[in-house]
Image (tube, rainbow, N blue to C red):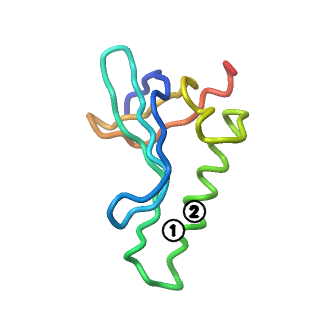
Amino acid sequence: MLNRLAKIKDVKFGFNSNLFGLSIQISGDSWETIGSYVYDTSINSLEYNGMTDMLENIQKLLKDANVKTIDKLLNKPVECTFDGLILKGFRILTEVL
């Protein structure tokens, strides 16, 4: 696992095909990646808590960034965790806010 520092460069909230949620463009010194919190609207199951999980993740992201709206996430510092070239997760760097 490799950790890299970056900033949030773009955020979008809405629908894309069957997916509903938040897409986040993250940029480092010489690289970019996309992170997301999404709900698959094609899954019809009472056992699937995807919408709740998505909203809880977005709520935590906003709280960690100390902002109230998604547009205020722009330029917030993040730490990304990669397994090879695959983004495994990211977090707001609360230590520097």
Query: Which quadrant would the C terminus be assigned to in this image?
Result: top right
Which image quarter: residue 92?
Answer: top right
Q: Estimate the x, y position of residue 77 in percent, counting from the top left.
A: 56, 23
Q: Residue 38 location in percent, x, y? A: 46, 58
Q: Residue at x 66, y 50 (%)?
A: 59
**Which residue occupies the foreground of this view, 28 or 23?**
23
Residue type of the residue flagged with mark 2 = Asp
Q: Residues within 10 Å of mark 2 (few under 14, many from 20)?
A: some
Residue 10, image quadrant: top left
The tag on residue 89 is none
Residue topped by disc 1:
50
Direction left: furthest residue: 85
Disc 1 marks a residue whose amino acid type is Gly
- Up/down of 37 relative to 81, above or below: below
Q: Residue at x 47, y 84 (%)?
A: 45
Tally the numbered discs: 2
From the top left corner, tell me how far across and down residue 42 is, in percent.
37, 76
The picture places residue 71, in percent across and down from the top left corner, at 59, 36
Marks 1 & 2, CB-CB < 8 Å contact: yes
Local secondary structure at mark 2: helix
Q: Residues within 10 Å of mark 1 (few under 14, many from 20)?
A: some
Q: Residue at x 49, y 23 (%)?
A: 7
Query: What's the CA distance linking mark 1 and mark 2?
Result: 5 Å
Residue wearing tag 2: 53
Mark 1 lies on a secondary structure that is: helix
Quarter of the image for the N terminus: give it. top left
- Residue 32 lies in what quarter of the image? top left
